[in-house]
Amino acid sequence: MTNPSLLILAGDGIGPEVMAQVARVIDWYGDKRGLKFDVSEDLVGGAAYDAHGTPLHDDTMARAQEVDAVLLGAVGGPKYDALDFSVKPERGLLRLRKEMDLFSNLRPAQCFDALADFSSLKRDVVAGLDIMIVRELTSGVYFGEPRGIFKEGNERVGINTQRYTESEIDRVARSAFELARRRSNKVCSMEKANVMESGILWRDVVTEVHAKDYSDVELSHMYADAGAMQLCRWPKQFDVILTDNLFGDILSDTAAMLTGSLGMLPSASLGAPMANGRPKALYEPVHGSAPDITGKELANPIACILSFAMALRYSFDQGDEASRLESAIESVLAQGVRTADLMQADTDAKPASTTEMGDAILAALDASL
Ligand code: NAD
């Protein structure tokens, strides 16, 4: 049997620094758990622009379509700010998402107990929080036509169009229900069916998909504005939240802030199943290339390592090994190991470097055996 394949695109800024720690974790799984991957590496973003004059070479795009999962670090940086829009580093990432048709964006909001005091909300509201936002990523108001700024009489009018087809809603709803079955079996779908026709269709299709194929999953509906309030009031009432592109953008950032640092947040973007049954998949931390701390060993590698844990769970059916990795991270945090972003400003304690955080996580993985 061939090993599952992984394409690593470390990218720019702190991308290669955090990805170096992920590479150590991948090696650990090969050595200690017999879980071997065929790993290849390539360029994306500014690094690809420097080498090829494009933020994503066609050969890299083709490889991304073939592998079982792509792991991405981060793209961008001040060096590339003046580039033409068409070759900016971010275009490389957008091309990957678009051509792989990654319509289902999974953003977990998980609050490790040791970090509960980092949230802007009270400890008892967030401690132990573990929810997942499923955001539709390839349609909706960011893509709908007509769009543009037009002249209307004596003034300009800006137009964007919220547009969803039944099949677009159907496929992302299925991905949320499938996910819920691996978690607490509960989906809350959020839209604005009270004021938007696309919201009415969204609610109808989600209800139909549920009745037809997922009636074992508990389904509720909520208006997205009420959902935002509930996320801040008592987020633990949710398990999986299913929502569209625009509301998902806002709700996932809101949920992210419940958990503290940007250096802790992973994500997955999934597409349709490939011939081997695995979904097309790209895993990446939510954070960017953090030029302010690049090259200083200050980056927190946990978001990127948790993204690999998501790959273990959602691409490679290794839920137990993903839990092992998450527990290792939890125990490291409980021991008090902290990169600078996880430390209160008024402390004199010395932060762990990026590599020291990697060391601690590997030691905790060893201890888990
Ligand atoms: P950023 O996420 O790079 O940084 C925001 C702040 O969070 C910075 O102070 C940074 O030091 C800190 N931070 C981020 N990740 C961290 C980590 N792992 N450990 C410790 N601290 C961390 O966002 P930004 O500053 O707005 O953008 C910088 C560049 O990254 C820009 O070029 C932007 O376009 C790009 N960007 C890329 C992505 C991506 O690749 N997906 C996402 C967002 C921004």
Image (cartoon, helix red, strand yellow):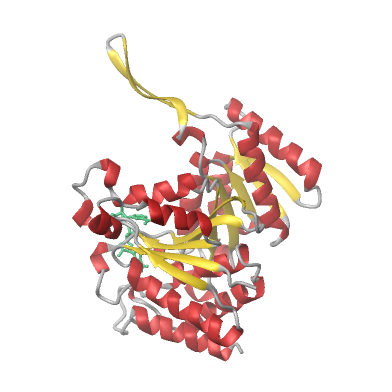
Task: Name which residue lies at 45% across and 53% down.
Answer: 62
Residue 257 sits above or below residue 154 on the image: below
Q: Is residue 307 left or right of residue 130?
A: left
Nearer to us in this view, 227 or 240: 240
Seen from this angle, which residue lies furthest top? 153
Task: Name which residue lies at 29% across and 42% down.
Answer: 86
Give the quarter of the figure containing the C terminus.
bottom right
Q: Is residue 37 left or right of residue 304?
A: right
In which image quadrant can residue 190 be found?
top right
Q: What percent of the width, then of the height, locates residue 193?
A: 62, 31
Nearer to us in this view, 299 or 129: 299
Give the quarter of the figure containing the N terminus.
bottom right
Evaluate whether residue 305 shows in this view: yes
Ligand 1 position by quadrant? bottom left
Nearer to us in this view, 328 or 271: 271
Task: Name which residue lies at 49% across and 81% down.
Answer: 27
